[in-house]
Image: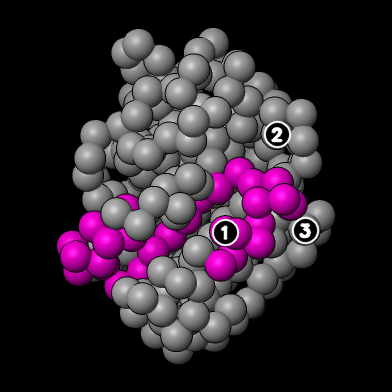
Amino acid sequence: MNICLAQIQPITGDIAQNIKRHQQFVDKAIAHHADLILFPELSLTGYEPTLAQELALAPDDARLAVFQAQAEAGGITICVGVPTRGEPLPGISLLIFRPQQPRSLYTKQFLHADELPFFTAGPATVGRIGLQNEAALAICYEISVPEHAQAAASSGAKIYLASVAKYARGMGEAYGRLATIAQTHQMTTLLVNCVGLADGELCAGGTAVWQPNGQRLAQLDDRREGLLIFDTKTEVFSTLTG
């Protein structure tokens, strides 16, 4: 499976412009024969907890139909980061668009303490995607919860895909966690982060891939938008920046 990680710089609160930017990245992924593209946490709005309630979308929001059209035309699975309407507070979700299938979502089930005033946790489930459902989804803080990776491995997942919004001060720990997850569960692990401002601080990019032995194979830099495309069978990768 060719997985494309989209290191994007969201425009805070501007859903319309972020949709257009996402479409451009999806078009590039299709041109490079990607089977799946994954965006960072809350990529359609920016990671802005204090704005999440007013920016939250319904999963069936008509503005997002453009991604279903791209999925159909390009034969690609698209995972975009969205705050989704919930009770009493929004969820932190990945909306998933697959060819010839209804859209679905995975909602972050393990929240950081700082997120509890702004978000509601999702149901306990393993979010599986991929050509043969071989990949499991994680959203940011979930990579720090051992039970999450264990559940993914126990479900039979061979690939662990983490969508995050992380600052420089959190990247060392995130890298260590994903290397450990890879080695412990013999899963290929991948992380996609954003760049630019998020909740008043700069996100640190560093989108990367780890082999099942825990070795980091490839990564993007900490400042520029770009794509990291990884073939899970051959372990060949390519990067596009700017």
Q: Is residue 88 above or below residue 62?
A: above
Residue 149: image quadrant is bottom left
Viewed as shown, does residue 47 lie left or right of 232? right
Q: Quadrant of the C terminus?
A: bottom right
Amino acid carrying mark 1 in the image: Ala
Answer few, some or many: residues within 10 Å of disc 1's Cα (few below 14, many 20 plus, some between 14 and 19): some
Q: Is 113 one of the magenta-colored residues?
A: no
Q: Which mark is residue 198?
A: 2
Name the residue: 28% across, 39% down.
Answer: 104
Q: Is residue 174 above or below residue 181?
A: above
Q: Which mark is residue 222?
A: 3
Q: CA distance from mark 2 to mark 1?
A: 17 Å
Q: Which mark is residue 174?
A: 1
Q: CA distance from mark 1 to mark 3?
A: 14 Å
Query: Relative to the observer, which residue lies in front, 182 or 29?
Result: 182
Whole-percent x, y for residue 234 in the image: 45, 88
- Please tell me which of labels 2 and 1 falls first in the chain: 1
Whole-percent x, y for residue 120 in the image: 37, 23
Residues shaded magenta:
148-176
Amino acid carrying mark 2 in the image: Ala
